[in-house]
Amino acid sequence: MSQVAVIGAGIIGMAAARALQQDGHAVTVFDPDEPGRGCSFGNAGHIAIDHILPLARPAVLASLPRLLADPLGPLRLRPAGLPRLLPWMLRFAAACRPAQVSAGTDALAALLTLAGPAWSRAIDASGLAPLFRRHGSVNLYEGDPAAAATEAAQLVAHGIRAEMWSAHEVARRVPGLAVPVRAGRFLPDACHSVDPHGVVLALARRFAADGGRIERRAVDGFDLAEGRVRRIRAGGGHFVCDHVVLAAGSAAAPLARALGAAAPLTRERGYHVMLEPGALDLDLPVTFAERGFVVTPMQAGPRLAGTVELGAFGAPDWRRADILVTHARQLFGRTTLAAASRWSGDRPTLPDYLPMLGPAPRAGNAVLALGHQHLGLTLAATTGEIVAALVAGRPAPVDLQAFRAERFGVI
């Protein structure tokens, strides 16, 4: 039985640990915090199988001057953070080349078509069914409905089912809208979690019940010999392992460097607001395309989530959470809607908006699984299955060339 160390107890780390455990390995998870306390705690809960376009693309790059002037828009670049963010932004600009965007879209689509089936297996294996709903999801368009049709056609071309809704069908299926919506794009195969943090905790409980160990220790380095990790250094101790999986989110860059990979991660900030239970009558996630946020029905009440904030290295700008409530009031004509709670978290994001999945350059027994940006929950089960295949020496279920660890340089 192989001894596998998984670094990181967020949704990616716990999904990988559970998949490895089911594959017959003895697994120990290392994280100084309790499972799911990072960005896994507050995500939108949406299994976003439609997010096949990397955010690094020409249209976004061209919009940056305007975004600098709008502190409350869906994408915000904080001027004060620019000097520190500049190297990342230069890589982002390079990733916006049309050929790279096309290749990245194809690669993400290949991963995302695996997400639903992978989650079905994970839900069944770990008893997670009470935490998920299979009601589909819908994107609504207040502007040109041609955009919805174009996106739907692109999704269908990549093997993802999408249906167009008329304005009449939107009004019927999404009650209470107070603004004109011209079209909808419905994903019948999408699902969502009613408690994303609860998913991580449930995985951790099942993992522990089946003999897995969770060590509340920070990993600070590795002992390497002959191209393999022999021991990890954590909390003043040394732990022998046969394989290592690095899934430490935003904290992964120094450890990836120690394993030979440059991982230029930035902390891309997002926000959510919880409304009181019953505040909105929805049974599926609803994304408002032009406004850049999603409303997800959850056990604790509707969650308003979204926004992208780059260069946010200081305290949260809570106006970006409050604007979500403003949008909801406008969209549903409910001036009394108010935040029951607010949250901010930092997504681990690489400049090309593709995760890093594959063997580490300097250690043949180490796998990198990091940089999942907005798609951590969406791709967690798929990533877990890929990690388990790589550790076992089996072929991955998808071509990993676009996600290779060496793409930003070998150290």
Image (cartoon, helix red, strand yellow):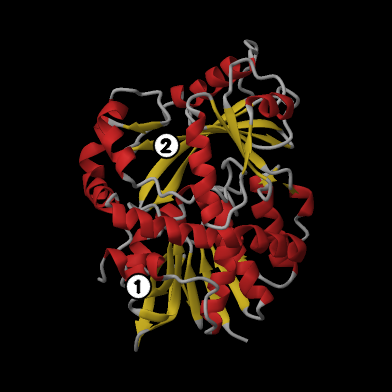
What SS does tag 1 mark?
loop
Q: Quadrant of residue 138?
A: top right
Q: Is residue 53 above or below residue 381?
A: above
Q: Where in the figure is residue 32, as x and y percent of width and height?
A: 51, 57
Please state which amino acid type lies under the numbered disc 2: Val
- Residue sitting nearer the eye, 177 or 145: 145
Among the 4 quarters of the image, the one containing residue 365: bottom left
| Residue under the point 32% across and 68% down | 261
The x and y percentages for residue 28 are 58, 71
Q: Is residue 322 above or below residue 360?
A: above
Residue occupying the point 36% across, 31% down: 76
* Residue 144 percent across, percent down from the top left: 48, 27
Q: Quadrant of the N terminus?
A: bottom right
How far apart are labels 1 and 2 at the CA level? 30 Å
Mark 2 neighbour class, 10 Å CA radius: few under 14, some 14 to 19, many 20 or more: many
In the picture, which quadrant includes the C terminus? bottom left
Of labels 1 and 2, earlier in sequence is 1
Name the residue beneath numbered marker 1.
259
